[in-house]
Amino acid sequence: MPLLEESSLPRDCTQTVPVVIIGNGPSGICLSYLLSGYTPYLDPMAVHPNPILFRKLQEAKQLPITEQDLEFLCEGLEGRSGNPVAVLFDTLLHPNADLGFEFPSVLQWRLEKKHHIPHLVLGKATPGGAWHAMEGSMLTISLGIWMELPGVNYRDLTPGKRRSVSNDRATPDEISSYYKNYVKLMGLQKNFVDNTYVTSVQKLHRSHEKSIRNEKNTVNGQESIGFSQGNSQGLWEVRGYQQLQGDTHVPFSLFAENVVLATGASDSPARLGVEGEDLPYVFHSVHDLGVAVSCHSNLNSSSDPVLVVGAGLSAADAVLCALNHRVSVLHAFRKRADDPGLIFKQLPKTLYPEYHRVYHMMCSQVYPASPVANPTAPSPSLFPDYTSFPEHCVLSFQPDMHCVMRGSNGVLRVFKVSMVLVLIGTYPNLFFLKEQGQHLGLDPSRPISCRQNPVDINPYTFECNADPGLFAMGPLVGDNFVRFLKGGALGIASCLPERQKDRDGG
């Protein structure tokens, strides 16, 4: 979809808001909930199983969590996130969850207008973000209750969906529906602008700030929110367009005191960078496989195998999808099958039996190490349903639908395939920032990567260390699970009121 030229955006149609959130997935939804005035307090009837944390909470029980010293509360806590506030918020919402317990939250939520901060949430589709594009029938990696957002129990919105006591995982369809309903139930719709594409985010020079400060412009009949005096952090200009019915693009320009990056990690798939990767039978999304098996009769049990490249959960999802439709699979990955770093080793078998089924095949149905005499002919060495190729790398994809791979012993192997899924990770697409936001990373010399080079933030406010007034949360800062990305909302919602006081001279 072509972007509008930046120069075509009208400069005389500008709205000013204290906070613009880019991304309407669970990160953006959760932050909107807190900024709308929903305020967390310690429930007076609750007892947290961590006695040290509980004692700290009781010392300031009259204050909302957002007004307490988060660094003090985080001391000594351990969890499966590298961000301390994410671990704190998780243990307040789901105490001792990693030990297999399902204790109730110790938080009590109160809607308090004095804590409301005006904001807009800009998203490419309806609220829910990337969950709308995921394969609908597969189960999520997390339990359904870990996917829920504050204030609304996941099971209350999905009655009758519970599968078993030991396995309460959800499908992406159920999760995306939950997020859409959550926004309506919590009355957050007025903050969300759907079908919106951001094309530019840049900090304004001082001369530009003076010219717009305290203006009152009108956008779509709405009066803008004027900026306060004494803004020492600088202002941000956010440009883009909204897609309306009939493929109409309406450009917009906003000014914001703070911008929050909540774009997730699934925008740009990682690529192998090999010959033929742009051929029409090579794809980079599990969704494309789902479409192929549903809509094209030539992909079935009698077709050539599907090649899946990668050893993560998305690759496992593709393997399962193909096998469920009786399509044979070739599965190539760089690591050894017994590599301790594989994600499957971190998943309990009782909760994730289908992923352990894939992992068992990765280890037991391995292609022999000897070379193939006639690589272009059907090989008797292939297993009928699935064959794994550990320590293999793809060298090229050919126009005649042959794939060339090389094993650890240097032997080349060539196979004819019907479709290729390259599923080796994703990168966030921050094209709307200068140099795609590379200067924000822990290593500014490398592109932003959610796992290898996340955005460098203050761990308690989630403000970017390289750019005051710019915040990041969710996968951009290494929190890839919904369970933990909510911590970014707590950190930002705790920081912004203090920032507003400073601007107002309070």
Image (cartoon, rainbow, N blue to C red):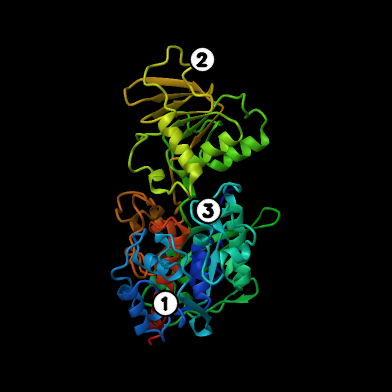
- Choose mark 2 or mark 1, whichever is in front: 1
Q: Amino acid at mark 3?
A: Asn
Report the Cα–Cα distance between label 2 and label 1. 66 Å
Q: Amino acid at mark 1?
A: Val
The residue that label 3 is drawn on is: 167
Disc assigned to residue 377: 2
Q: Quadrant of residue 251?
A: bottom right
Amino acid type assigned to the residue bearing label 2 in the image = Ala
Between 15 and 70, the one nearer to me in the picture: 70
Q: CA distance from mark 2 to mark 3?
A: 43 Å
- Residue 66, given in percent of the width and then of the height, sits at 41, 77
Left or right: where 418 falls relative to 409: right
**Residue in view at x 44 percent, y 63 percent:** 101
Residue 189 falls left or right of residue 450 = right
What secondary structure is marked by label 2? Answer: loop
Callout in the foreground (2, 3): 3
Q: Nearer the viewer, residue 411 or 384?
A: 384
**Residue at the right extreme?**
246
Per the rendering, the mark at residue 47 is 1
Q: Is residue 245 left or right of residue 265?
A: right
Residue in the foreground of this view, choosing between 281 and 298:
298
Which mark sits nearer the N-terminus, 1 or 3?
1
